[in-house]
Image (cartoon, rainbow, N blue to C red):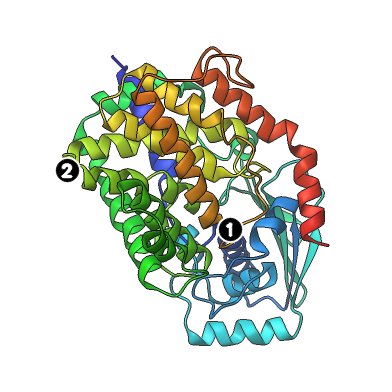
Amino acid sequence: MISIEMKNEYLAILTEELVPAMGCTEPIALAYAAAEGSRVLGAEPEKIIAHCSGNMIKNVRCVTIPNSDGLIGIEAACILGAVAGDAAAKMEVLERVDAAGRARTKELLANGSCSVEFLDSEIPLHFILDLYAGEDRVTVEIRTSHTNIVSIVKNGETIFAKPEELARTGYATDRSQLSIEGIKAFADEIEIEKLRPFCERQIRCNMDIAYEGMAGDYGLGIGRMIRESYAESVVTRMKAYTAAASEARMGGCDMPVIITSGSGNQGIASTVPVIIYAREKNIPTEKLYRALIFSSLLTIFQKEFIGKLSAFCGAVSASCASAAAITYLSGGTTQQIKATIDNTLANIPGIICDGAKISCAAKIASSLDASMMAHYLAMQNKEYEAYTGILKEDAGETISCVGYIGKVGMRETDKEIIKMMLG
């Protein structure tokens, strides 16, 4: 049995994490900060200087900004947020951008109104925006998570400062209580009506963008290619629709996604495969809801060790979680769920993150292929033994080790990736 206190904590974690976002979350975070800075400035900024960590630069460089008429880059995200964004909408800050806002953004871009400077920070998700209008200056700082504004300073006076603990973690909930056993107990026992609002929104938003990705003209059309070229199967459909959703999102689609761990791709990869599988197998809706929550919490648990941004591809964590949720959905035991995790992490723990871009969809498809192989092995009670490579005695320990490698061990790798990307 899981305690009432832990149930409430897990629900609070879900409330913090499962939020809607338009487009890749890094440019959206910049647009949000710029919109908030512009609001405090009380005028359209004449100049913006964006001081960005390497991971922010890496993840904004190649993606199309939604509602921007095809614009890319830090400068475009900052200006569009400042002149046409709605800070109150947070990760949907660009939802109401109109033609006038896009035209003004292009004009200011052409004038060089925004510049980018490298922020040498040990925090992967970290940026500071300076916005200027006349004699006034506003500085907005975000770190650790995408909407975690830690300070706002206007003309040298601090008008907002977040308490240090909240500033450091980026959230108010206690993630130390997360565990594989706890997540399974929560998914088994929580009242279904408390899950319904989370899951209905995940299904609606994330499947809508999956259908759009399959039908629309985004990137290489990887979803359609998978459907047309691979043998017909539930795994083929899972890979196709999940990859299509990612490609649409990376390609500038303005439809919202319910994100997980600050990532739309992880939100997609931890939900769409589970939904496709459940529909294929005629799984009851209540059981699907429990599996979706299991997958979301397991993704969050893994990312707690890795961090929001790193050199480690988040598609692996989310795909691992979705396959483990499918083991759960299929009536697998706790040991079989753990075997799915270990079998996945024995195979693909080393896919690098070289920034957000349309080829993330291919990484998601490959990760799902590996994680479903892990699932099928686990359902046959086959698993790699402890101390095979980096595997530990328990899957929770394996997750923590992979997280340490991604967060600490690959720190220098991350720096080299950023150097290569920036030429």
- How many other residues sit within 10 Å of disc 1, few (<14), some (14-19) or many (≥20)? many
Which residue is denoted by mark 2 in the rendering?
282
Q: Position of residue 336 (x, y in %)?
A: 37, 21
Q: Quadrant of the C terminus?
A: bottom right
Identify residue type, mark 2. Answer: Asn
Task: Give the structural element (helix, strand or loop) at label 1.
Answer: helix
> Residue, x 55% and y 26% (percent of image)?
399
> Residue, x 48% and y 50% (percent of image)?
365
Task: Give the structural element (helix, strand or loop) at label 2.
Answer: loop
Q: Position of residue 228 (x, y in %)?
A: 37, 63
Quarter of the image where one finds residue 40: bottom right
Identify residue type, mark 1. Answer: Ala
Q: Earlier in the sequence, mark 1 or mark 2?
A: 1
Judge by depth and name the residue closer to the eye, 76 or 388.
388
Which residue is denoted by mark 1 in the rendering?
29
Q: Position of residue 341 (x, y in %)?
A: 47, 27
> Residue, x 59% and y 30% (percent of image)?
305
Q: Kindly tell me whether residue 174 is visible in this rendering.
A: no
Q: Quadrant of the N terminus?
A: top left
Vertical relation: 219 (above or below) 321: below
- How many other residues sit within 10 Å of disc 2, few (<14), some (14-19) or many (≥20)? few
Instruction: Give the alpha-carbon distance from disc 1 to disc 2, as whole Å.
Output: 38 Å
Vertical relation: 62 (above or below) 418: below
Q: Position of residue 237 (x, y in %)?
A: 34, 53
Quarter of the image where one finds residue 165: top right
Q: Are marks 1 and 2 in contact (CB under 8 Å)?
A: no
Q: How many marks?
A: 2
Vertical relation: 319 (above or below) 225: above
